Amino acid sequence: MSTDLYRCPDLLIAGTWRRGAGAHRMPVVNPANAEMLGELALASAQDLQDALDATGPAFEQWRRVPAHERCARLERGVARLREQSEHIARLLTLEQGKPLAEARAECAMAADLIKWYAEEARRVYGRVIPARTPDSRMTVLKSPVGPVAAFSPWNFPLVLSARKLGGALAAGCSIILKGAEETPASVAAMVDCLHQELPPGVLQLVYGVPAEVSDTFIASPTIRKLSFTGSVPVGRHLAQQAGRHLKRITLELGGHAPVILCEDADLARAVPLLVAQKFRNAGQACLAPTRFYVARRLYGDFLDAFSHASQSLRLGPGLDAQTQMGPVANGRRQAALTQLIERTVAQGARKLAGDAPDAGHFVAPTLLADVPHDAAAMQEEPFGPVACALPFDTLDGAIAMANHNPYGLAGYLFTDSARAILAVSERLEVGSLAVNNLGVSVPEAPFGGVKDSGYGSESGIEGMEAFLDTRFLHCAA
Protein backbone atom coordinates (compact mmCIF):
# COMPACT_ATOMS: atom_id res chain seq x y z
CA MET A 1 0.00 0.00 0.00
CA SER A 2 1.33 3.40 -0.94
CA THR A 3 1.18 6.14 1.64
CA ASP A 4 -0.64 8.11 -1.07
CA LEU A 5 -3.64 5.84 -0.48
CA TYR A 6 -3.81 6.59 3.23
CA ARG A 7 -6.80 8.69 4.29
CA CYS A 8 -7.69 9.85 7.78
CA PRO A 9 -11.15 8.55 8.67
CA ASP A 10 -14.32 10.40 9.61
CA LEU A 11 -16.29 9.94 12.81
CA LEU A 12 -19.09 7.36 12.99
CA ILE A 13 -22.07 8.99 14.71
CA ALA A 14 -25.68 7.78 14.68
CA GLY A 15 -24.97 5.35 11.88
CA THR A 16 -23.34 7.88 9.53
CA TRP A 17 -19.69 8.60 8.78
CA ARG A 18 -19.10 12.33 8.98
CA ARG A 19 -16.17 14.67 9.26
CA GLY A 20 -15.32 15.91 12.74
CA ALA A 21 -16.49 19.47 13.23
CA GLY A 22 -14.04 20.38 15.99
CA ALA A 23 -11.63 23.26 15.72
CA HIS A 24 -8.62 20.99 16.21
CA ARG A 25 -6.78 18.94 13.58
CA MET A 26 -4.23 16.32 14.55
CA PRO A 27 -1.42 15.17 12.25
CA VAL A 28 -1.09 11.42 11.77
CA VAL A 29 2.56 10.51 11.27
CA ASN A 30 4.32 7.47 9.83
CA PRO A 31 6.84 6.67 12.61
CA ALA A 32 9.14 4.83 10.20
CA ASN A 33 10.10 8.09 8.45
CA ALA A 34 8.41 10.84 10.53
CA GLU A 35 6.40 11.94 7.47
CA MET A 36 2.81 13.10 7.85
CA LEU A 37 0.15 10.75 6.49
CA GLY A 38 -2.74 13.14 6.93
CA GLU A 39 -4.67 15.39 9.30
CA LEU A 40 -7.41 13.95 11.47
CA ALA A 41 -10.47 16.15 12.05
CA LEU A 42 -11.48 15.86 15.72
CA ALA A 43 -14.92 15.89 17.26
CA SER A 44 -16.68 19.06 18.35
CA ALA A 45 -18.81 19.37 21.47
CA GLN A 46 -21.87 18.96 19.24
CA ASP A 47 -20.44 15.80 17.67
CA LEU A 48 -20.01 14.29 21.13
CA GLN A 49 -23.52 15.30 22.16
CA ASP A 50 -24.94 13.80 18.97
CA ALA A 51 -23.20 10.51 19.80
CA LEU A 52 -24.69 10.57 23.30
CA ASP A 53 -28.14 11.35 21.93
CA ALA A 54 -27.90 8.34 19.62
CA THR A 55 -26.47 5.76 22.01
CA GLY A 56 -29.41 5.69 24.46
CA PRO A 57 -32.17 4.84 21.95
CA ALA A 58 -29.80 2.46 20.14
CA PHE A 59 -29.20 0.60 23.40
CA GLU A 60 -32.93 0.12 23.97
CA GLN A 61 -33.20 -1.38 20.49
CA TRP A 62 -30.08 -3.56 20.66
CA ARG A 63 -30.77 -5.00 24.12
CA ARG A 64 -33.99 -6.52 22.75
CA VAL A 65 -32.22 -8.36 19.94
CA PRO A 66 -32.04 -12.05 20.93
CA ALA A 67 -28.59 -13.30 21.90
CA HIS A 68 -28.37 -15.77 19.03
CA GLU A 69 -29.04 -12.95 16.55
CA ARG A 70 -26.49 -10.66 18.21
CA CYS A 71 -24.03 -13.52 17.88
CA ALA A 72 -24.84 -14.01 14.19
CA ARG A 73 -24.48 -10.31 13.39
CA LEU A 74 -21.14 -10.03 15.16
CA GLU A 75 -19.87 -13.17 13.43
CA ARG A 76 -20.76 -11.66 10.05
CA GLY A 77 -18.80 -8.58 11.04
CA VAL A 78 -15.85 -10.76 12.05
CA ALA A 79 -15.98 -12.54 8.69
CA ARG A 80 -15.79 -9.15 6.95
CA LEU A 81 -12.90 -8.17 9.22
CA ARG A 82 -11.00 -11.30 8.23
CA GLU A 83 -11.65 -10.62 4.54
CA GLN A 84 -10.20 -7.12 4.88
CA SER A 85 -7.38 -8.04 7.25
CA GLU A 86 -4.57 -7.38 4.76
CA HIS A 87 -5.82 -3.87 4.04
CA ILE A 88 -6.35 -3.13 7.73
CA ALA A 89 -2.95 -4.53 8.68
CA ARG A 90 -1.22 -2.26 6.19
CA LEU A 91 -3.05 0.76 7.55
CA LEU A 92 -1.93 -0.24 11.04
CA THR A 93 1.71 -0.59 10.00
CA LEU A 94 1.69 2.78 8.25
CA GLU A 95 0.31 4.72 11.21
CA GLN A 96 1.72 2.73 14.15
CA GLY A 97 5.00 1.35 12.79
CA LYS A 98 4.90 -2.32 13.77
CA PRO A 99 6.11 -4.90 11.23
CA LEU A 100 3.44 -6.05 8.82
CA ALA A 101 3.56 -9.61 10.18
CA GLU A 102 2.74 -8.27 13.65
CA ALA A 103 -0.05 -6.09 12.25
CA ARG A 104 -1.57 -9.14 10.54
CA ALA A 105 -1.36 -11.07 13.81
CA GLU A 106 -3.04 -8.23 15.68
CA CYS A 107 -5.88 -8.11 13.18
CA ALA A 108 -6.37 -11.87 13.53
CA MET A 109 -6.37 -11.60 17.33
CA ALA A 110 -8.95 -8.82 17.21
CA ALA A 111 -11.19 -11.02 15.10
CA ASP A 112 -10.72 -13.94 17.50
CA LEU A 113 -11.64 -11.75 20.47
CA ILE A 114 -14.87 -10.48 18.93
CA LYS A 115 -15.83 -13.95 17.72
CA TRP A 116 -15.32 -15.42 21.19
CA TYR A 117 -17.49 -12.75 22.75
CA ALA A 118 -20.13 -13.28 20.05
CA GLU A 119 -20.30 -16.97 20.91
CA GLU A 120 -20.41 -16.19 24.62
CA ALA A 121 -23.50 -14.03 24.11
CA ARG A 122 -25.49 -17.28 23.94
CA ARG A 123 -24.15 -18.39 27.33
CA VAL A 124 -25.08 -15.48 29.60
CA TYR A 125 -26.84 -17.49 32.27
CA GLY A 126 -28.68 -16.56 35.45
CA ARG A 127 -29.69 -19.07 38.10
CA VAL A 128 -32.64 -20.32 40.13
CA ILE A 129 -32.40 -20.13 43.92
CA PRO A 130 -34.47 -22.52 46.07
CA ALA A 131 -37.45 -20.50 47.26
CA ARG A 132 -38.01 -19.79 50.96
CA THR A 133 -41.81 -19.94 50.73
CA PRO A 134 -44.33 -22.11 48.88
CA ASP A 135 -45.69 -20.90 45.56
CA SER A 136 -42.78 -18.57 44.91
CA ARG A 137 -39.64 -18.49 42.82
CA MET A 138 -36.31 -16.72 43.31
CA THR A 139 -34.09 -16.16 40.30
CA VAL A 140 -30.97 -14.22 39.39
CA LEU A 141 -31.00 -12.50 36.00
CA LYS A 142 -28.29 -10.88 33.90
CA SER A 143 -28.98 -7.81 31.77
CA PRO A 144 -26.80 -5.41 29.79
CA VAL A 145 -25.49 -2.55 31.90
CA GLY A 146 -26.36 0.17 29.39
CA PRO A 147 -24.52 2.51 27.01
CA VAL A 148 -20.74 2.21 27.28
CA ALA A 149 -17.94 4.70 26.69
CA ALA A 150 -14.62 3.06 25.85
CA PHE A 151 -11.15 4.52 25.44
CA SER A 152 -8.36 2.59 23.70
CA PRO A 153 -4.66 3.43 23.11
CA TRP A 154 -2.36 3.39 20.11
CA ASN A 155 0.01 0.51 20.89
CA PHE A 156 -2.42 -2.32 20.02
CA PRO A 157 -5.34 -0.28 18.72
CA LEU A 158 -7.20 -3.18 17.11
CA VAL A 159 -6.89 -5.74 19.91
CA LEU A 160 -7.49 -3.30 22.75
CA SER A 161 -10.53 -1.85 20.99
CA ALA A 162 -11.85 -5.32 20.12
CA ARG A 163 -11.81 -6.39 23.78
CA LYS A 164 -14.17 -3.54 24.58
CA LEU A 165 -16.32 -3.69 21.45
CA GLY A 166 -16.77 -7.45 21.57
CA GLY A 167 -17.81 -7.59 25.21
CA ALA A 168 -20.16 -4.62 25.09
CA LEU A 169 -21.92 -5.57 21.86
CA ALA A 170 -22.25 -9.24 22.75
CA ALA A 171 -23.76 -8.36 26.12
CA GLY A 172 -26.38 -6.17 24.45
CA CYS A 173 -24.87 -2.75 25.19
CA SER A 174 -24.42 0.13 22.81
CA ILE A 175 -20.91 1.58 22.79
CA ILE A 176 -19.10 4.79 21.85
CA LEU A 177 -15.42 4.11 21.23
CA LYS A 178 -12.85 6.86 21.43
CA GLY A 179 -9.98 5.45 19.44
CA ALA A 180 -6.40 6.66 19.61
CA GLU A 181 -5.82 9.71 17.44
CA GLU A 182 -2.36 8.38 16.46
CA THR A 183 -3.85 5.26 14.80
CA PRO A 184 -7.27 6.25 13.47
CA ALA A 185 -7.59 4.56 10.09
CA SER A 186 -7.01 0.95 11.15
CA VAL A 187 -9.52 1.18 13.99
CA ALA A 188 -12.08 2.90 11.75
CA ALA A 189 -11.71 0.12 9.19
CA MET A 190 -12.34 -2.52 11.86
CA VAL A 191 -15.31 -0.61 13.26
CA ASP A 192 -16.83 -0.32 9.77
CA CYS A 193 -16.73 -4.11 9.38
CA LEU A 194 -18.92 -4.47 12.48
CA HIS A 195 -21.04 -1.35 11.99
CA GLN A 196 -22.51 -2.68 8.76
CA GLU A 197 -24.28 -5.43 10.71
CA LEU A 198 -25.67 -3.24 13.50
CA PRO A 199 -28.57 -0.81 13.96
CA PRO A 200 -27.54 2.86 13.70
CA GLY A 201 -26.01 4.22 16.89
CA VAL A 202 -25.23 0.86 18.49
CA LEU A 203 -21.55 1.24 17.61
CA GLN A 204 -20.07 4.73 17.28
CA LEU A 205 -16.49 5.96 16.85
CA VAL A 206 -15.08 9.35 17.73
CA TYR A 207 -11.67 10.98 17.83
CA GLY A 208 -11.14 14.13 19.83
CA VAL A 209 -9.25 16.07 22.47
CA PRO A 210 -8.98 13.35 25.14
CA ALA A 211 -9.95 15.48 28.16
CA GLU A 212 -12.95 16.95 26.32
CA VAL A 213 -14.21 13.52 25.28
CA SER A 214 -13.78 11.88 28.68
CA ASP A 215 -15.28 14.83 30.59
CA THR A 216 -18.32 14.85 28.33
CA PHE A 217 -18.97 11.12 28.38
CA ILE A 218 -18.35 10.53 32.07
CA ALA A 219 -20.59 13.41 33.13
CA SER A 220 -23.44 12.26 30.89
CA PRO A 221 -26.21 10.34 32.69
CA THR A 222 -26.66 8.32 29.50
CA ILE A 223 -23.34 6.48 29.94
CA ARG A 224 -23.48 3.69 32.50
CA LYS A 225 -20.13 1.92 32.02
CA LEU A 226 -16.57 3.02 31.22
CA SER A 227 -13.65 0.98 29.96
CA PHE A 228 -10.17 2.47 29.68
CA THR A 229 -6.75 1.16 28.66
CA GLY A 230 -3.85 3.55 29.07
CA SER A 231 -1.49 5.19 31.53
CA VAL A 232 -1.71 5.15 35.32
CA PRO A 233 -2.07 8.95 35.71
CA VAL A 234 -4.93 9.14 33.22
CA GLY A 235 -6.54 6.03 34.71
CA ARG A 236 -6.48 7.55 38.18
CA HIS A 237 -8.08 10.73 36.87
CA LEU A 238 -10.84 8.84 35.06
CA ALA A 239 -11.49 6.66 38.12
CA GLN A 240 -11.96 9.78 40.24
CA GLN A 241 -14.37 11.21 37.68
CA ALA A 242 -16.25 7.92 37.44
CA GLY A 243 -16.51 7.76 41.21
CA ARG A 244 -18.10 11.21 41.38
CA HIS A 245 -20.78 10.06 38.94
CA LEU A 246 -21.05 6.49 40.32
CA LYS A 247 -20.09 4.96 36.97
CA ARG A 248 -18.71 1.47 36.73
CA ILE A 249 -15.22 1.42 35.23
CA THR A 250 -12.70 -1.17 34.07
CA LEU A 251 -9.07 -0.02 34.06
CA GLU A 252 -6.05 -1.66 32.41
CA LEU A 253 -3.17 0.65 33.19
CA GLY A 254 0.01 -0.90 31.91
CA GLY A 255 2.69 -3.08 33.40
CA HIS A 256 6.37 -3.64 34.05
CA ALA A 257 6.38 -7.42 33.83
CA PRO A 258 8.93 -9.35 35.90
CA VAL A 259 10.61 -12.50 34.59
CA ILE A 260 12.16 -14.95 37.06
CA LEU A 261 14.65 -17.41 35.57
CA CYS A 262 15.60 -20.07 38.12
CA GLU A 263 18.81 -22.10 38.08
CA ASP A 264 17.15 -24.95 36.18
CA ALA A 265 15.73 -22.68 33.47
CA ASP A 266 16.43 -23.80 29.90
CA LEU A 267 18.08 -20.68 28.45
CA ALA A 268 18.28 -22.13 24.96
CA ARG A 269 14.49 -22.33 24.93
CA ALA A 270 13.66 -19.32 27.10
CA VAL A 271 15.83 -16.59 25.55
CA PRO A 272 14.45 -16.73 21.98
CA LEU A 273 10.90 -16.64 23.37
CA LEU A 274 11.71 -13.73 25.66
CA VAL A 275 13.53 -11.69 23.02
CA ALA A 276 10.65 -12.12 20.56
CA GLN A 277 8.07 -11.13 23.17
CA LYS A 278 10.09 -8.27 24.67
CA PHE A 279 10.75 -6.53 21.36
CA ARG A 280 7.39 -7.26 19.74
CA ASN A 281 5.82 -3.92 18.77
CA ALA A 282 9.17 -2.31 19.68
CA GLY A 283 8.53 -3.18 23.31
CA GLN A 284 5.37 -1.04 23.42
CA ALA A 285 3.25 -3.65 25.16
CA CYS A 286 1.94 -3.54 28.70
CA LEU A 287 2.56 -7.27 29.12
CA ALA A 288 6.09 -7.23 27.67
CA PRO A 289 8.70 -9.04 29.81
CA THR A 290 10.88 -6.21 31.05
CA ARG A 291 12.49 -6.85 34.47
CA PHE A 292 14.66 -9.98 34.31
CA TYR A 293 15.64 -11.55 37.62
CA VAL A 294 18.15 -14.29 36.79
CA ALA A 295 19.68 -16.92 39.08
CA ARG A 296 23.28 -15.84 39.61
CA ARG A 297 24.72 -19.07 38.15
CA LEU A 298 22.93 -18.36 34.84
CA TYR A 299 23.34 -14.59 34.83
CA GLY A 300 26.42 -14.26 32.62
CA ASP A 301 25.13 -16.76 30.07
CA PHE A 302 21.77 -15.02 30.03
CA LEU A 303 23.30 -11.60 29.35
CA ASP A 304 25.38 -12.99 26.50
CA ALA A 305 22.50 -14.86 24.89
CA PHE A 306 19.88 -12.14 25.32
CA SER A 307 22.08 -9.26 24.14
CA HIS A 308 23.30 -11.25 21.12
CA ALA A 309 19.77 -12.21 20.09
CA SER A 310 18.37 -8.71 20.60
CA GLN A 311 21.20 -6.99 18.74
CA SER A 312 20.69 -9.40 15.84
CA LEU A 313 17.15 -8.16 15.23
CA ARG A 314 16.70 -6.36 11.93
CA LEU A 315 15.24 -2.87 12.40
CA GLY A 316 13.43 -1.01 9.66
CA PRO A 317 10.09 0.15 8.24
CA GLY A 318 7.23 -2.15 9.06
CA LEU A 319 6.28 -2.65 5.40
CA ASP A 320 9.72 -4.13 4.68
CA ALA A 321 9.31 -7.91 4.74
CA GLN A 322 12.75 -8.31 6.32
CA THR A 323 11.99 -6.06 9.30
CA GLN A 324 11.81 -7.75 12.70
CA MET A 325 11.35 -4.61 14.82
CA GLY A 326 9.90 -1.32 13.72
CA PRO A 327 10.12 2.19 15.18
CA VAL A 328 8.51 3.40 18.38
CA ALA A 329 5.28 5.23 17.82
CA ASN A 330 6.41 8.83 17.92
CA GLY A 331 9.17 11.27 18.76
CA ARG A 332 7.92 11.66 22.33
CA ARG A 333 8.47 7.97 23.04
CA GLN A 334 11.87 8.08 21.37
CA ALA A 335 13.00 11.00 23.53
CA ALA A 336 11.54 9.54 26.73
CA LEU A 337 13.30 6.20 26.18
CA THR A 338 16.62 7.85 25.41
CA GLN A 339 16.39 9.84 28.63
CA LEU A 340 15.34 6.80 30.67
CA ILE A 341 18.34 4.80 29.42
CA GLU A 342 20.70 7.68 30.19
CA ARG A 343 19.34 8.13 33.70
CA THR A 344 19.58 4.43 34.45
CA VAL A 345 23.15 4.18 33.17
CA ALA A 346 24.05 7.19 35.33
CA GLN A 347 22.67 5.22 38.29
CA GLY A 348 25.08 2.34 37.66
CA ALA A 349 23.62 0.10 34.95
CA ARG A 350 25.62 -1.26 32.01
CA LYS A 351 24.15 -0.64 28.55
CA LEU A 352 24.24 -3.44 25.98
CA ALA A 353 22.68 -2.24 22.73
CA GLY A 354 23.07 -2.25 18.98
CA ASP A 355 22.46 0.46 16.42
CA ALA A 356 19.24 2.00 15.17
CA PRO A 357 18.39 3.68 11.83
CA ASP A 358 18.92 7.42 11.76
CA ALA A 359 15.62 8.27 10.05
CA GLY A 360 12.29 7.83 11.80
CA HIS A 361 11.53 7.17 15.46
CA PHE A 362 13.80 4.20 16.11
CA VAL A 363 15.32 3.07 19.42
CA ALA A 364 17.80 0.20 19.40
CA PRO A 365 16.91 -2.96 21.35
CA THR A 366 18.65 -2.32 24.66
CA LEU A 367 19.58 -4.56 27.58
CA LEU A 368 20.55 -2.78 30.78
CA ALA A 369 22.62 -5.12 32.95
CA ASP A 370 23.37 -4.90 36.68
CA VAL A 371 20.55 -2.40 37.11
CA PRO A 372 20.30 -1.15 40.71
CA HIS A 373 16.99 -2.22 42.16
CA ASP A 374 15.83 1.36 42.72
CA ALA A 375 17.11 2.72 39.38
CA ALA A 376 14.77 4.56 37.04
CA ALA A 377 14.20 1.80 34.49
CA MET A 378 13.41 -0.73 37.22
CA GLN A 379 10.69 1.45 38.71
CA GLU A 380 9.26 3.28 35.68
CA GLU A 381 7.58 1.38 32.87
CA PRO A 382 9.88 1.80 29.84
CA PHE A 383 7.13 1.03 27.31
CA GLY A 384 9.74 0.52 24.63
CA PRO A 385 12.63 -1.77 23.58
CA VAL A 386 14.44 -1.61 26.93
CA ALA A 387 15.03 -4.63 29.18
CA CYS A 388 16.59 -4.63 32.66
CA ALA A 389 18.53 -7.52 34.22
CA LEU A 390 19.66 -8.26 37.76
CA PRO A 391 20.96 -11.48 39.38
CA PHE A 392 19.36 -13.09 42.43
CA ASP A 393 20.62 -15.58 45.01
CA THR A 394 17.37 -16.90 46.50
CA LEU A 395 13.88 -17.34 45.09
CA ASP A 396 12.45 -15.43 48.06
CA GLY A 397 14.71 -12.54 47.14
CA ALA A 398 13.62 -12.63 43.50
CA ILE A 399 9.94 -12.59 44.43
CA ALA A 400 10.49 -9.71 46.84
CA MET A 401 12.31 -7.67 44.18
CA ALA A 402 9.65 -8.46 41.57
CA ASN A 403 6.88 -7.31 43.92
CA HIS A 404 8.69 -4.11 44.91
CA ASN A 405 7.11 -2.24 42.06
CA PRO A 406 3.73 -0.49 41.72
CA TYR A 407 2.71 -2.50 38.65
CA GLY A 408 1.08 -5.91 38.69
CA LEU A 409 -0.20 -6.92 35.26
CA ALA A 410 1.73 -9.93 33.95
CA GLY A 411 4.64 -12.07 35.12
CA TYR A 412 6.74 -14.91 33.74
CA LEU A 413 8.57 -17.81 35.37
CA PHE A 414 11.02 -20.28 33.85
CA THR A 415 11.73 -23.38 35.93
CA ASP A 416 10.97 -27.09 36.21
CA SER A 417 10.75 -26.93 40.01
CA ALA A 418 7.28 -27.62 41.40
CA ARG A 419 8.32 -25.86 44.59
CA ALA A 420 9.29 -22.70 42.69
CA ILE A 421 6.10 -22.78 40.61
CA LEU A 422 3.98 -23.02 43.75
CA ALA A 423 5.86 -20.23 45.53
CA VAL A 424 5.74 -17.81 42.61
CA SER A 425 2.14 -18.58 41.64
CA GLU A 426 0.99 -17.85 45.20
CA ARG A 427 3.17 -14.85 45.98
CA LEU A 428 3.93 -12.92 42.79
CA GLU A 429 1.60 -9.90 42.66
CA VAL A 430 0.33 -10.03 39.09
CA GLY A 431 -2.97 -10.56 37.32
CA SER A 432 -1.57 -13.19 34.92
CA LEU A 433 1.38 -15.57 35.25
CA ALA A 434 2.89 -17.76 32.52
CA VAL A 435 5.21 -20.63 33.47
CA ASN A 436 7.72 -21.79 30.83
CA ASN A 437 5.74 -19.93 28.18
CA LEU A 438 4.54 -16.39 27.42
CA GLY A 439 0.80 -16.85 26.89
CA VAL A 440 -0.93 -14.46 29.29
CA SER A 441 -3.60 -13.04 26.96
CA VAL A 442 -6.12 -15.23 25.15
CA PRO A 443 -9.79 -14.49 24.37
CA GLU A 444 -11.22 -17.15 26.69
CA ALA A 445 -9.25 -16.12 29.82
CA PRO A 446 -9.48 -12.94 31.92
CA PHE A 447 -6.86 -10.27 31.38
CA GLY A 448 -6.38 -7.56 33.97
CA GLY A 449 -4.01 -6.35 36.65
CA VAL A 450 -3.59 -5.65 40.34
CA LYS A 451 -2.05 -2.71 42.19
CA ASP A 452 -1.36 0.22 39.85
CA SER A 453 -2.08 -1.93 36.79
CA GLY A 454 -5.78 -1.32 37.33
CA TYR A 455 -8.83 -3.34 38.24
CA GLY A 456 -11.44 -5.42 36.50
CA SER A 457 -10.88 -7.87 33.67
CA GLU A 458 -11.35 -8.00 29.94
CA SER A 459 -11.76 -11.22 27.92
CA GLY A 460 -13.08 -14.47 29.34
CA ILE A 461 -16.40 -14.76 31.12
CA GLU A 462 -15.13 -12.10 33.52
CA GLY A 463 -14.82 -9.67 30.62
CA MET A 464 -18.42 -10.36 29.60
CA GLU A 465 -19.58 -9.95 33.20
CA ALA A 466 -18.14 -6.42 33.21
CA PHE A 467 -20.90 -5.37 30.79
CA LEU A 468 -23.76 -7.01 32.69
CA ASP A 469 -25.94 -6.02 35.64
CA THR A 470 -27.08 -8.67 38.11
CA ARG A 471 -30.72 -8.57 39.26
CA PHE A 472 -32.59 -10.62 41.84
CA LEU A 473 -36.22 -11.51 41.01
CA HIS A 474 -38.58 -12.91 43.70
CA CYS A 475 -42.04 -13.86 42.41
CA ALA A 476 -44.92 -15.10 44.53
CA ALA A 477 -48.18 -16.55 43.27
Image (cartoon, rainbow, N blue to C red):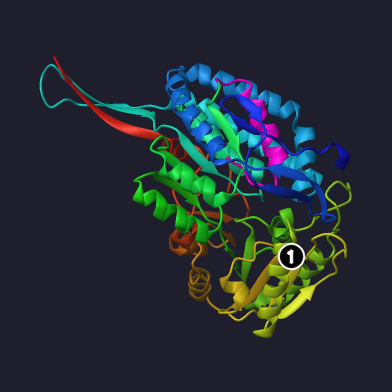
**Element marked by disc 1:** helix
Q: Nearer the viewer, residue 416 or 397?
A: 397
Residue at 38% x, 37% y: name it. 221
Instruction: Give how far across and how far down residue 422 sits, in percent.
Output: 47, 60
Image quarter hosting the C terminus: top left
Q: Nearer the viewer, residue 191 or 212?
A: 212
Image-based side of 317 in relation to 166, left or right: right
Quickly name the residue at label 1.
334
Please state which amino acid type lies under the numbered disc 1: Gln
Magenta stretch containing residue 214, yes or no?
no
Q: Is residue 290 visible?
A: yes
Residue at 45% x, 33% y: name it. 147
Image-based side of 271 in relation to 406, left or right: right
Instruction: Give how far across and how far down residue 270 sits, in percent.
Output: 69, 60
Q: Is residue 229 visible?
A: no
Residue at 35% x, 29% y: name it. 142
Residue at 62% x, 25% y: name it. 16
Q: Residues within 10 Å of mark 1 (few under 14, many from 20)?
A: some
Image quarter hosting the N terminus: top right
Q: Which residues are magenta?
A: 178-199
Image-based side of 304 in relation to 114, left or right: right
Instruction: Give how far across and how far down residue 255 sits, in percent.
Output: 56, 60
Q: Nearer the viewer, residue 464 or 135?
A: 464
Magenta stretch containing residue 189, yes or no?
yes
Instruction: Give how far across and how far down residue 317 sits, in percent.
Output: 85, 52
